[in-house]
Amino acid sequence: MTSDIGNGATVLKNTLRNALIVSCQPVPGGAMDDSPYVVGFALAALSAGAAGLRIESARYVAAVRAATDAPIIGLIKRDLDDSPVRITPFLDDVCALADAGADIIAFDATDRVRPASVKALAQAVRDAGKLSMADCSCVEDAERALAAGVDFVGSTMSGYTGGPEPVDPDIDLVAALRKLTPNVVAEGRIRTTEQAQAAARAGASCVVVGSAITRTEHVTAWFRDAVNEVYAPAPVVLAVDLGGTKIMASLVQDGKVLDTTVFATDRAGSAESWVASIVDAVAPWKGRYSAAGIAVTGAVRDGKWRAMNKATLAIDGEFPLEARASQLLGVPVVVANDAQAAAWGEFKATSDRSDLVFMTVSTGLGGGIVAHGNLLRGVAGHFGQMRGTSEENVPLESRICGPWIASEAKRLGHPVEPKQVFAAAAAGEDWAASVVDGVAQRFARLCCDIQLSIDPARIIIGGGVGLAAGFLDKVNAEIAAIGPSARPRLLSAALGTKAGIVGIADLAVVGR
Ligand code: ADP
Ligand code: BMX
C-alpha cells in the first residue's frame, strides 16, 4: 500500500528517478543560514542539473517554493529533550511542511523513543496529499516504514543512531534497501563523485548530496585539514632508547634528530629508577615535545615491560611502562621493544619497501621484522633468545654479545672492554681474533638460519658490536665459509646507533 495522490505521484517519482537531489541545509547559525542563501544554493543546484531539492524548515521550504516548481523534499529538524529523533518528529511538522509547499515529506524512521510513530507520520503525510520519505538507519527501519505505506526509503540515518560517526557513506545499506523497493534514496556522507556513482550503482533511485555542495564550512574544513597535513610542522617527539648498557634520549621531528643526550644504564637499578633517570635527563626539554616513545630492551605487550633475559637487563616482573612514563612525562607515551623500533626506523629511513630483519648485536641480541610494510610486534624478532643446536641450553646471545666478549677476554687474561678486544684483534693479537672470529661465526650461522626461516630481502645489523669496525666483513666471510643454500644480504644500519630512536619516534607520532 503506498500513498495515492494519483498521477502527480507517478510524475514526481519519475522526475526523481535516476537523478541527483541537492540538499540545501546551511550550517545552523552559520553565515549562510538565511533564506536568500538557501534559495541561491537551490537555484544554483537546479541550474546545474539537480532534479530536486532537500530543504529543512517550513520557512526555507516556503522561500524555495516561491522561487521554483522543482520537487522539494521537506523536513524539520528539532533537538528534543526526551527523544533522539531529530527529523520531523511531530505530526504538526508534517502539516507545516505541506502548507509550505513540500512535495515529499521526510521523517526519521528509526526504532527509537519518539513523539509520533512512523505509521502515524506516514498517514499524516498521505492525509496532506504528499509523498513520504522514511529516513532509515537499517533494513528493519525500512521494512517497518514500507509496511506503514511510505513512498521512499532513504539511507539517511545510517551511522547516526549511536557510536562513532562513520566517515564514508553506507553503500551496503543502499543495496540492501534496493532489495525491498525500487524507491530508494541514497543519502548521508556522499562527498565525492565516486561515492555518488557507487550509490547509484548500488540501486538507488536517486542520490542526495548535501554538505559536499552546500555546506561551505564543511568543505572548507575538509580542504583545510588536508592542506595542514602537508604544511603543518611535524610534531616534536621525545624518543628514548633504553638498552642494557646505555640510555639514549633525543628530540625528533619528522625523522630528524634535533638534540640528544646519552648516559649509562644503571645495571643495578630497577624499572622505576631507569624511568626516573630518563625523566631527570630530559627535564631541560620540558614543553618542547608533545608525545614520547620509549624503545626498551625486553619484551613489551600492551604497554607493559618485562625481561626476556635478565642477564641483559634485570627487569623485575612486568612493569606498566607506558602508563608510568606518561604519568611522569605528562604526554602520551608509546613503548616498544628496542630492536623492533630500530627495524621500523630502518624501514622508514629509505624508499626500499622490501621486507627486512633488523638485528642489534649489543648487550643482548635483539631483532625486529618488517613484513609487507608491517612491523611484527609481541616477541617477534627475539632471535637472541633462541637456543640453537649447541649442547649448552643457553640463549644464543649469551655467546655472541658484548658481555660474553668481555667475559671471554677476561678469561683469556685480558680484562678489557669489547671495544678494546676488537682493537686488539685488528692489531693482530691472536687471543682477541679468536674471540671476535668466534662471535662472527656464531652470528653468521644465525643469519643463515634466519634467511631459511623467513627469507628476508635484507638483514640489517645495528648495535655496539654489530656496528664495530670490521665486524660485518668478518660475518660475511663466515657466511661464505658456511656456503649456505640461501645467502643472507647483510647491511649496516643506515641510521647507525639512532635506528631505535628514529623508529620509536615515528611509532609515537602515529600512536602505534
Ligand atoms: P645497548 O645494548 O644498551 O643498546 P649498545 O648497542 O651500545 O648499547 O651495545 C652495548 C654493548 O656493545 C656493550 O657490551 C659494549 O661493550 C659493546 N660495544 C659498544 N661499542 C663497541 C665497539 N665499538 N666495539 C665492540 N663492542 C662495542
Ligand atoms: C635481549 C632482550 C631483547 C633485546 C635485546 C637487545 C631483555 C632485557 N632483552 O635479547 O628484548 O631487544 O636483548 O637488548 O630480555 P640491548 O640492551 O642490547 O639493546
Image (cartoon, rainbow, N blue to C red):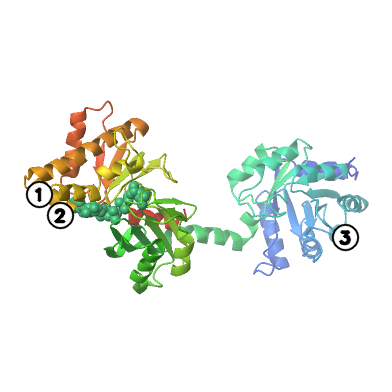
User: Sequence-wise, which precedes: disc 1 or disc 3?
Assistant: 3
Q: Position of residue 40 (x, y in %)?
A: 68, 61
Image quadrant occupied by the N terminus: top right
Looking at the image, is 72 positioned above or below residue 437? below
Using a 10 Å C-alpha cutoff, classify the residue at mark 3 as few (fewer than 14 neighbours), some (14 to 19) or many (20 or more).
few
The residue under label 3 is: 99
Residue 344 in view = no
From the viewer's perspective, tell me whether residue 353 is left or right of residue 223: left
Closer to viewer: mark 2 or mark 3: 2
User: Sequence-wise, which precedes: disc 2 or disc 3?
Assistant: 3
Give the residue at x 72% y 62%.
39
Using a 10 Å C-alpha cutoff, classify the residue at mark 1 as few (fewer than 14 neighbours), some (14 to 19) or many (20 or more).
some
Residue at the right extreme? 127
Give the residue at x 73% y 66%.
35
Give the residue at x 43% y 68%.
329
Residue 248 in view = yes
Q: In 3D space, how far apart are the residues under numbered discs 1 and 3 (Cα atoms)?
A: 98 Å
Q: Position of residue 433 (x, y in %)?
A: 12, 42
Q: Position of residue 134 (x, y in %)?
A: 80, 49
Q: Are marks 2 and 1 in contact (CB under 8 Å)?
A: yes
The residue under label 1 is: 424
Using a 10 Å C-alpha cutoff, classify the residue at mark 2 as few (fewer than 14 neighbours), some (14 to 19) or many (20 or more).
some
Give the residue at x 61% y 55%.
212
The residue under label 2 is: 416
Question: Quick one: SS at disc 2?
Answer: loop
From the viewer's perspective, tell me whether residue 491 is left or right of residue 366: left
Q: Amino acid at mark 3?
A: Asp
From the viewer's perspective, tell me whether residue 192 is left or right of residue 479: right
Choose between 11 and 390: the one closer to the eye: 390
Q: In 3D space, how far apart are the residues under numbered discs 2 and 1 (Cα atoms)?
A: 10 Å
User: Sequence-wise, which precedes: disc 2 or disc 1?
Assistant: 2
